[in-house]
Image (cartoon, rainbow, N blue to C red):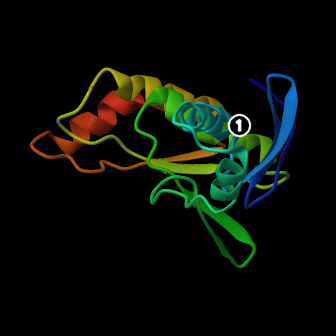
Amino acid sequence: MTVSDITFDQQQTSFILHYYGKPHQIQVPLIGEFNVLNVMAAVSVALKLGATWEKITAALKTFPALPGRQEQYVIDDVHYYIDFAHTPNGLESILEYLKNRKGSGRLICVFGAPGMRDKGKRPEMGSVVERLADDIIITDDDAAQENRREIISQIMKGI
């Protein structure tokens, strides 16, 4: 399975999915290169379960975005995205997508790390945001029983 002719806009991703040499036009109301890979995985499973291409392509056209994943809001021509990426790789994927499409605008990332979770990835996430965002606002998210300032300090070690 391969893909070609990938195009993005603010609302969807379109591409040709080649399966055993046969092209299939795919449109999905999700953004980002990483979602092309997610769609390929989902199509593989659907085909294995016996779904037809007609059902697969129809379902993908109306596939609902998950709450908290690439949610887009436009207010006064400013684009805001909410994405609850919780790993360095996930954060990097969404920020790379947005950075490549922001044009002359600024990419401002507001993010934090929850308490009582993998502390080791906090500096990594800070490093990703420093590399890809124009401006950074660090929050303490849901600290649980952890010290909020310590969470922020751990993120800052990557910046």
User: Which residue is located at x 32 percent, y 38 percent?
Assistant: 152
Does residue 84 appear to the left or right of 64 in the view shown? left
Residue 43 in the image: state x and y as whole percent. 62, 37
Tell which residue pokes out farthest to the right in this image. 5
Q: Is residue 138 visible?
A: yes
Say what secondary structure mark 1 lies in.
Answer: helix
User: 81 and 141: which one is in front?
Assistant: 81
Read off the residue under disc 1.
33
The answer to whether one can see residue 158 in this image is: no
40 up-or-down from 80: above or below: above
From this view, report whether residue 82 is shown above or below residue 124.
below
Q: How many marks?
A: 1
Q: Which of 15/11 is in front?
A: 15
Please state if 119 lies on the left or on the right of 80 as rendered.
left
Tell me which residue sits at (24%, 41%) in the image. Answer: 149
Which residue lies most toward the left here? Answer: 145
Quadrant of residue 96 within the rendered picture:
top right
Q: Nearer the viewer, residue 44 or 2?
A: 44
Taking depth in this image into account, of 44 and 79 the one nearest to the observer is 44
